[in-house]
Amino acid sequence: MAENSNARSRKVDSLISRDAGRKYWEGVAADVNGMLGGFPQVSRVDLRGSRNFLAKFGIGSKPGQRMVASALEGGAGIGRITEGLLLDGIARQVDIIEPIAKFTAALQGKPGVRTVFTMGLEDWQPPPDVQYDLIWIQWCVAHLTDEQLVGFLERCKSALNPDDGLIVVKENNSTSGADEFDDLDSSVTREDRTFRRIFAEAGLRLIQAELAKGFNTGTTKLLPVRMYALKPAQ
């Protein structure tokens, strides 16, 4: 009997190889072009869309908005988002998780960058004396299995400011009707429904989801990118 798409999507993450993924990124240039897979032109619209999304929760530097004290970026790469968004009127201090040391070398000691955790998301443990007002996770969780992603999100939840902390996940969505494995970088592009299931398993409540706009212009044709705003379910 043929497997249905749900069964397939729950198994495809078992193909992910941590070593293969790291090998791929070690061979990528430490610049915006490398971080964005040859589409550096989307960086500006990406950052603008992220800033507009945060503004819906009152976060920002404009009148009537608030800057947060402490943020965490998961899978930060060279710090494109840390420098271009988080430390640009969003957060006063940012911690970074990134396994590829050459990417974060230039961020060490920069004003506003507090701690650089040179490790994978699957290995990160929240520091005992820090609470985050904002946790931003973008274009990186495709390298985690479903189980690893649930665990990482649970740890993020435990480190979140209990009063008004917010987790944002911004990731590509599969459009094929199933989660899709890419052997080029050993990653999985998940369907929207897979993300929603994982968020629920991690004890998170989805408070808003929004498709990013402005990526597909001219000859640039990319997968849909969706932003998920999350808070603890209880």
Image: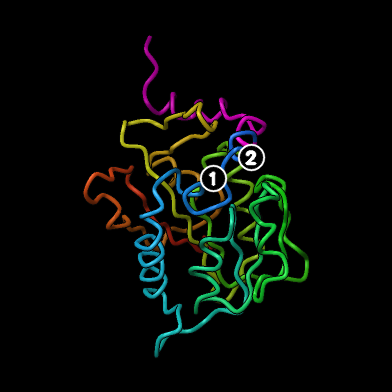
Q: State the image coordinates of residue 7 (x, y, percent, origin top left).
A: 44, 24
Note whether residue 200 is visible: no
Q: In which quarter of the image is the N terminus?
A: top left
Residue placed under numbered mark 2 in the picture: 26
Is residue 73 a member of the stretch shown in magenta?
no
Q: Where is residue 22 in the image (x, y as percent from the top left)?
A: 64, 37
135 sits to left or right of 64: right
Name the residue nearer the viewer: 57 or 24: 24
Majority secondary structure in the magenta region = helix
Residue highlighted by disc 1: 141
Residue 230 position in % (x across, y down): 48, 61
Spatial CA distance of label 1 from label 2 is 17 Å
What residue sits 66% from the left and 70% below the top?
113
Outermost residue, top side: 1
Q: Residues within 10 Å of mark 1 (few under 14, many from 20)?
A: many
Which residues fall within the magenta stretch? 1-22
Question: Going from the N terminus, do you reach mark 1 or mark 2 first?
Answer: 2
Q: Is residue 72 visible?
A: yes
Which one is nearer the viewer's eye here, 181 or 47? 47
Q: Quadrant of residue 63?
A: bottom left
Q: In this view, does 8 lie above or below 221?
A: above
Please identify the quadrant where the C terminus is shown. bottom right
Give amino acid for label 2.
Answer: Glu
Residue type, numbered disc 1: Val
| Mark 1 and mark 2 residues within 8 Å of each other at the beta carbon | no
Secondary element at tag 2? helix
- Give the residue at x 37% y 52%: 226
Work out which residue is located at the far right of the displayed protein and give it.
128
Residue 109 against residue 15 in the figure, above or below: below
Q: In this view, does 18 lie above or below 202?
A: above
x and y, in percent, of residue 101 in the image: 70, 50
Q: What element carries label 1?
A: helix
